[in-house]
């Protein structure tokens, strides 16, 4: 309306349409001092506005109060902007707090990862040392297996010789039996035949001595093989069993040889008695025939045992060669594992460096977040 229409109105009526309302202008006049504040004002159109009110009393030259001057300033957009900034600052503060927690967790995880990497690196170094020890042990075992294979091959050749000698002795015994049968059928040539039998018995004794020597050598080889198997540990257990069986067979051979020696001695004694006592030649010849037959049976058993011994020793040699090949493959595998362990140790070192970089970045991130948090709090506007 027209300005003169508002002359004499109270400020409460003018601004708020409320005659009884005390305004800042009223307070300034009462206090005779400036007043200021922010108020929420609803326009006639119903729009909500925030206004900054400043009122100052004024006086005449004599100090008499004349009235007050009031300034209204619309700060709605400013306060709305301040509110949005405060809300954004709150969101930033929350995000900074969460980021600080994440950075703290990341730093802790990096430290834990570094500890685990250090443990893994130490374990890898220890593993490489143990792998090297294993490789050395495998090489030593391989050398022992090769030695066992060579000894087994030698034992196989000796067993073959034993078999051949036993077969020869068996043949000699068969010839002795035939000779005795001829002596029994030709009593008139008893003396000559008995001498021949004595000579043949001596030949059998020499053969038995040879068989005894061979059995001693077989027993010694079996003992050496058992020692080598014991050195080989778990891998040589089966070989030790076979070597023990070879030793037992050698002892049986020696026992059988002793029996043959006893039989040959009996033949020689019987031959001497028959030479001196021609009248009892028939009975003595029969006794000699039985003894020689027993000797043939013993030699047949020796042949059988010798064949089995040769087969078993050849099997031992083959198994030792196969074990040597397997040991070589183990050596190659251990070398490959050692290489992989070295690569793993190198990768652990690189990973440790990366983890330290991550920890440094997390620390820098926390510093940035800290500076962000300290500068993001709500600030009042003037």
Image: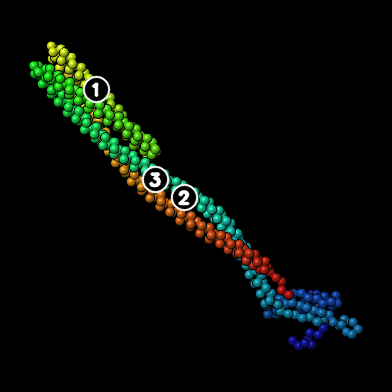
In percent of width and height, residue 56 lies at: 82, 79
Q: Quadrant of residue 298?
A: top left
- Dot 3, how many residues are within 10 Å of its Cα: few (below 14), some (14-19), or many (20+)? some
Q: Is residue 58 left or right of residue 99?
A: right
Number of numbered discs overlaid on the protein picture: 3
Q: CA distance from mark 3 to mark 1?
A: 47 Å
Q: Report the residue at 50% width, 59% height from top.
A: 350
Disc nearer the start of the sequence (3/1)? 3
Determine the secondary structure under disc 1: helix
Q: Report the residue at 31% width, 44% height from top.
A: 322
Closer to us: mark 2 or mark 3?
Answer: 3
Closer to us: mark 2 or mark 1?
Answer: 1
Q: Which residue is mark 2?
A: 128
Viewer-side residue, 235 vs 27: 235
Marks 3 and 1 close (CB-CB < 8 Å): no
Q: Is residue 204 above or below residue 160?
A: above
Viewer-side residue, 160 vs 235: 160
Closer to us: mark 3 or mark 1?
Answer: 1
Determine the secondary structure under disc 2: helix
Q: CA distance from mark 2 to mark 1?
A: 62 Å
Q: Which residue is mark 1?
A: 261
Disc nearer the start of the sequence (2/1)? 2
- Dot 1, how many residues are within 10 Å of its Cα: few (below 14), some (14-19), or many (20+)? many
Q: Report the residue at 67% width, 71% height from top.
A: 83
């Amino acid at each position: 309306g027209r300005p003169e229409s508002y002359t004499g109105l109270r400020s409460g009526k003018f601004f708020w349409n409320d005659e009884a309302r005390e305004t800042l202008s009223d307070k300034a006049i009462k206090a005779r001092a400036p007043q200021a504040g922010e108020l929420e004002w609803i326009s006639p159109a119903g729009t909500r506005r925030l206004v900054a009110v400043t009122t100052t009393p004024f006086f005449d030259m004599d100090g008499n109060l004349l009235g007050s001057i009031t300034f209204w300033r619309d700060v709605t957009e400013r306060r709305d902007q301040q509110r949005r900034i405060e809300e954004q600052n709150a969101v930033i503060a929350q995000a900074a707090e969460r980021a600080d927690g994440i950075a703290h967790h990341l730093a802790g995880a990096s430290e834990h990862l570094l500890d685990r990497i250090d443990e893994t690196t130490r374990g890898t170094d220890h593993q490489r040392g143990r792998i090297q020890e294993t490789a050395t042990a495998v090489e030593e075992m391989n050398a022992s297996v090769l030695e066992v294979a060579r000894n087994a091959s030698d034992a196989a050749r000796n067993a073959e010789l034993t078999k051949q000698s036993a077969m020869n002795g068996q043949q000699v015994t068969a010839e002795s039996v035939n000779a005795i049968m001829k002596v029994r059928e030709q009593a008139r040539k008893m003396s000559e035949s008995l001498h021949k039998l004595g000579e043949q018995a001596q030949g059998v004794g020499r053969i038995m001595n040879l068989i005894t020597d061979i059995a001693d050598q077989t027993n010694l080889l079996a003992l050496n093989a058992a020692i080598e198997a014991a050195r080989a540990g778990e891998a040589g257990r089966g070989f030790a069993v076979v070597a023990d069986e070879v030793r037992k067979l050698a002892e049986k051979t020696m026992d059988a040889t002793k029996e043959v020696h006893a039989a040959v001695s009996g033949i020689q004694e019987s031959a001497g008695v028959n030479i001196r006592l021609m009248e009892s030649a028939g009975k003595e010849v029969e006794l000699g025939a039985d003894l020689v037959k027993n000797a043939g049976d013993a030699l047949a058993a020796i042949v059988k045992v010798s064949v089995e011994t040769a087969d078993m020793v050849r099997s031992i040699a083959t198994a030792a060669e196969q074990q040597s090949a397997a040991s070589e493959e183990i050596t190659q595998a251990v070398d490959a594992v050692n290489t992989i362990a070295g690569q793993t140790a190198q990768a652990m070192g690189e990973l440790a460096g990366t983890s330290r970089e991550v920890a440094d970045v997390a620390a820098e991130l926390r510093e940035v977040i800290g500076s962000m948090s300290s500068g993001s709090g709500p600030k009042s506007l003037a």
